[in-house]
Amino acid sequence: MLTKDEVYSKVTDCLVDALGVDEDEVSPDATLTGDLGAESIDFLDIVFRLEKSFGIKIPRGGLFLENILSNPEFVKDGRVTEKGLQELREKMPHLDIDKFAKEPNVNNFADLFTVEMLVNYVSTKLN
Amino acid sequence: MSSSEKKFENKVVIVTGASRGIGKAVAVGFGSQGARIAINYKSNKDAAQETAQLVEQAGGKALLFQADISSRIDCEKLLEQVVAKWETVHILVNNAGVAKDGLVMGLDENDWDAVIKTNLDGTVFLSKAVLPYMMMQKYGRIINISSVSAGNGRRGQGAYSSSKGAVEAFTRVLALEVAPKNITVNAIAPGMVETDMSDLVRGLANKQILAQIPVGRYAKPEDVADSVLFLASDKASYITGQVIRVDGGITLGIGI
């Protein structure tokens, strides 16, 4: 069984390889897109590397968002609706939706995808 | 040839439809440069074995992998088997193709499906399957075999032209998506090549066709293979999303 530090270290390796960032740029609260510059293709890259590194299977859309926010029922005027928040809580329990719900602007959504979130997701999978 | 000259030493290359024609020449070409070639064939095992022999004689390694490229499940299985043997894939040549010609008014749905599934779906889903491996190693080359028929219509080739036109569009989009990962995606559009597939039409209209080819001869499969090898080489690392016509100039004139 890996400790949380060991999981963090392996997640960091995956991010360094996938995103070409330096190890010291990776911190628990670093956001994948804002701080580490991840683009859409990088999310797939990260998923493949996590699967290989930890020997886990991550279902399509299981870690990163697929199409939830493109559903008009879930987004109105640039804000995620109550129904959308509920959907996110169900589909993405690894995200801190309560924090996001305080200001559910879609532009803030990417900030939920942090290094720590990845570590927690992988730790849950491993358990 | 000394080993230092072998451009693709130990590179793992999948060539679909490699039992004959262009695929065979591509496989042998990579073999001569020291690559490990996954020779895919659908039904003609004897011909595939002959390709494998030629690859080995040329200095490469070869293994046979039976798979029907029109089947998504077969595409995934093919990839799994290649990776089980050689751990990864560096170069994919989507060559397997079929033509079922006939006027659109008499189009048979099964023929349409067969052409689209092999030529287009096979290219798409095998590419999709190899991408994780290419992405992880930050290197990959995908070369799709299109046809001049994608850009210049031929009567009776509704299905074939459509499939190749879509392959070229797919080539551009995929190239855009994976460029940041050091994966290039290009297509070759051959003209009239001396293969089994073009046997009939060459037999029926030899003089008329030759008259339209400025260089005055049909392409040999090796002419196409040379361009595939170039696109797979480091010399072509800045080329992506392109379609290179290897057609002896057949598409340059106006046919009169």
Image (cartoon, coloured by chain):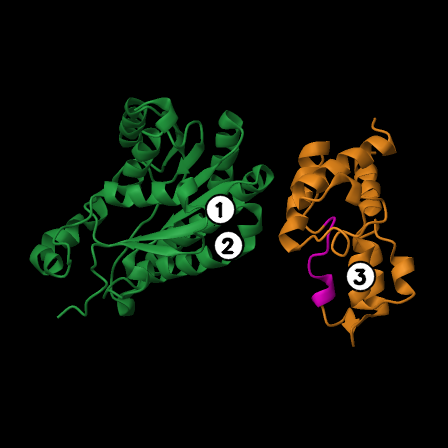
Chain colours: A orange, B green
Element under disc 1: helix
B138 lies left or right of A26: left
Residue that label 1 marks: B127
Find out whether the residues at labels 3 and 1 contact each other: C-beta distance under 8 Å: no
Any mark on residue B174, and which? Answer: 2
Tell me where residue B55 appears, x and y as whole percent: 31, 27
Q: How many marks?
A: 3
Q: Which quarter of the image is occupied by the C terminus of chain B? A: bottom left
Does the magenta stretch mainly form a helix, a strand or a loop?
A: loop
- 10 Å crowding of disc 2: few (<14), some (14-19), many (20+): many
Q: Residue at x 72, y 56 (%)?
A: A65
Residue that label 3 marks: A109
B202 lies left or right of B47: left
Q: How far apart in space, not on screen, are marks 3 and 2 (Cα)?
A: 27 Å
Find out whether the residues at labels 3 and 2 contact each other: C-beta distance under 8 Å: no
A39 lies left or right of B168: right
Instruction: State the extent of the magenta-drawn residues as a range.
Output: A62-70
Tell me where residue A47 appears, x and y as whole percent: 68, 44
Q: How far apart in space, not on screen, are marks 1 and 2 (Cα)?
A: 9 Å
Please, which residue is most extreme toward the bottom here?
Answer: A77
